[in-house]
Amino acid sequence: MTRRTLSALAASLFVAACAQNAPPPPGEPSPPRDVRLVLLGKGPLVIPNRTQVDGLRAGGLSGIVRAPDGTWLAVVDNEGETPARVFRLGFTVGEDGVSRDRQERRVVREAILLKGLNGKTFDGEGIALVPSETSGNLLVSSEIEPSIREFSLAGKLLATLPVPAPFLAGKGRGVRGNQGFESLTLEPGGAVLWTANERALQQDAPDDPAKPSPVRLLRYERRGEGFAPAAQYVYEVDAIDRPPAEGFKIRGLAELLAIPGGIGGAGGGLLALEREYVVGRGMTIQLFLVSLAGATDVSGLDSLAGQSFTPVRKTLVYDFAGAGFLPDNIEGMAWGPPLPDGSPTLVLVSDNNFELLQQTQIMALRWIE
């Protein structure tokens, strides 16, 4: 989500938001419910809005991934005509939450420019890191076309992944404005890549905030040196509870994260981040465990309208309404380092839309089974 679509957000950030959880389809087995997420520490680490690296503002962080050296790579969404970029960050994750490194106090350490692209031609939203034994390259999604591009760690464009026709923006079809590929995640091993549109494609369903919005989870598979589109599954974004008739409102699928096998009793699967904003209410940020078992592959359907299919199942596992602080526009999610007791951690980052009244927040959750 860009600053254009969230210009009304800054004035209403300090209003608590309500939460809603859509139940799984009746008659189907529920995914595991023994997963629990708990906030580490008392609140987020905040990067000051005045922070700059090489003359570029450090903000708009829309996706994050942990690098093998323990640093973090965060992609920036569009900011006018400034260069498209990825920032390298440094911070620690522990029982007390996210904190600055003791030896290196700077959180934002380096700007990696994505060569030939700027905020007018690229709207970075999701980021994934290909395992070093394969290439070690970056994969970055942009929501406006939509697109997924592969870059070297120096920011050189290497390849552009093919996008299935139903997603391509056009008259009456494809992604709606600023509702394209918000998410990106690689499964462990790097052979499977996932993304999704934020809200329903134009031909799939009307954009009615009072009704669930069917989006398509798009699976890519590594074939040779690249990735090719494979299956698609329907994920239903929750409806907004009592949406107001006037004022900006949106709820969408902002991020996906592949779950390694053996974590959460899920045998793999995905974690989904739904992000809602309603003028006068504020933010609702919720995490859902996603089960693909029994879901219909809809890759052969140009439109979902009038078709019969079984969506994926989802279970609410964390709601930031109970976090004890007001979350900002959280868009990025990555696996963090394990805690001393072996518990997995999740790291999340917010996109401040380069607005003075918003914050770049970094926070962490403990995964409990």
Image: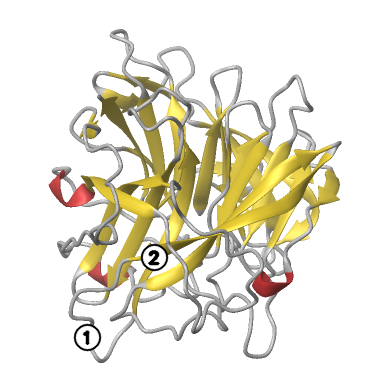
Q: Is residue 117 visible?
A: yes
* Location of residue 25 in the rendering, given as x and y in whole percent from the top left corner: 29, 61
Mark 1 or mark 2: whose residue is earlier in sequence: 2
Checking the image for residue 244, the label placed there is 1
* Location of residue 236 in the rendering, given as x and y in whole percent from the top left corner: 39, 65
Q: Amino acid at mark 2?
A: Glu
Label 1, secondary structure: give it. loop
Whether residue 290 is situated above or below residue 43 in the rendered picture: below
- At x 43%, y 83%, the residue is 207
196 or 33: which is nearer to us? 33
Query: Residue 221's image quarter?
Result: top right
- At x 60%, y 17%, the residue is 69
- The C terminus lies in quadrant: top left
- At x 31%, y 67%, the residue is 238
Badge 2 is on which residue?
A: 236
Residue 120 is left or right of residue 217, and the answer is right
* Location of residue 289 in the rendering, given as x and y in whole percent from the top left corner: 34, 44
Whether residue 347 is situated above or below residue 171 in the rendered picture: above
Instruction: Check whether the beta carbons of the residues at disc 1 and disc 2 lie within 8 A of each other.
Output: no
Residue 162 is left or right of residue 94, and the answer is right
Residue 293 is left or right of residue 114, and the answer is left
Q: Amino acid at mark 1?
A: Pro
Distance between the Cα atoms at labels 1 and 2? Answer: 21 Å
